[in-house]
Amino acid sequence: MISLKNIEKVYRTTNIETLALNNISLNIAKGEFLSIMGPSGCGKSTLLNIMGLLDAPSKGQIEIAEQTTEKLSDKQLARFRNQKLGFIFQSYHLINDLQVLDNVELPLLYRDASARERRQLASEALEKVGLSNRMKHFPTQLSGGQRQRVAIARAIVGKPEIILADEPTGNLDSAMGNEIMEILINLNQKDSTTIVMVTHDENMAQKTHRLVRLFDGSQVL
């Protein structure tokens, strides 16, 4: 589902060159739940952003769902992301002025879907994460765990083949973190969704199929 070959990422300023990722090669199978761990600044989020086509590598090749991405235009990349990928962030990134249902609908605004179809898909996504009774609430009226569940509903509303999660339990206590992990595991097992998760939590990582460790931009496991 995801193939990375000899990925390198270098950030350059006038005086400084920083190697963020060094020769990363990684294959992730369809339906796999992979976690990525490592100390802060080791390149975890950079690697996830490259997988999500939010950033481009300095060197190397990316293939997602049998599509080589390096020659796609910005418009084609945006369409590909919208159709194939769902994103979950540590800080939720919900719009506080929009109700929960409207937040979940957002990715569908970039597709040829009617308002009725958008509402139906958003309602189904919220039901999957156990928040069908909160559709008319605003994010500020929800707990951290509930907001993360809204973020998951938004990520899955378009039925993506791949979910990329950056520290999805990082802002939550252990009980709420376990609830979020159960939702992700359920999505992986029932819908065969491929999930790549960056985490600092060893306990959460051990619940996934495979663990990749990074150190100073290099893969060490």
Image (cartoon, rainbow, N blue to C red):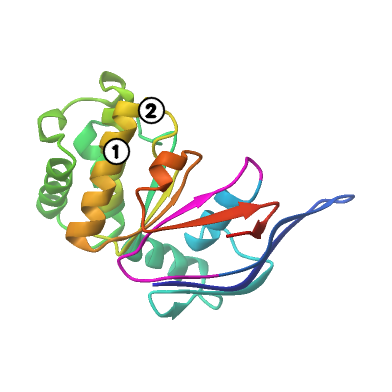
Q: Is residue 116 above or below residue 53?
A: above
**Residue located 37% across and 25% down the image:** 173
The amino acid beneath tag 1 is Ile
- Left/right placement of residue 146 relative to residue 125 reads right
Q: Is residue 112 above or below residue 179?
A: below
Q: Is residue 97 visible?
A: no
Give, as a single range, the part of the protein colored magenta.
26-41
105 and 32: which is toward the camera: 32
Mark 2 nearby-residue class (10 Å; few <14, some 14–19, many ≥20): some
CB within 8 Å, label 1 to label 2: yes
Give the residue pinned by disc 1. Answer: 180
**Residue located 21% across and 58% down the image:** 189
Mark 1 nearby-residue class (10 Å; few <14, some 14–19, many ≥20): many
Residue sitting farthest toward the top: 141
CA gap, disc 1 to disc 2? 9 Å
Nearer-N-terminus badge (1/2) = 2
Q: Would you say residue 39 sits in the magenta stretch?
A: yes
- Left/right placement of residue 120 relative to residue 209 reads left
Percent position (x, y) of residue 115?
14, 50
Quadrant into which the N terminus falls: bottom left
122 and 44: which is toward the camera: 44
Quadrant into which the C terminus falls: bottom right
Percent position (x, y) of residue 123?
12, 44
Disc number placed over residue 172 in the picture, else none = 2
**Residue located 86% across and 50% down the image:** 16
Residue sitting farthest toward the right: 15
110 and 213: which is toward the camera: 213
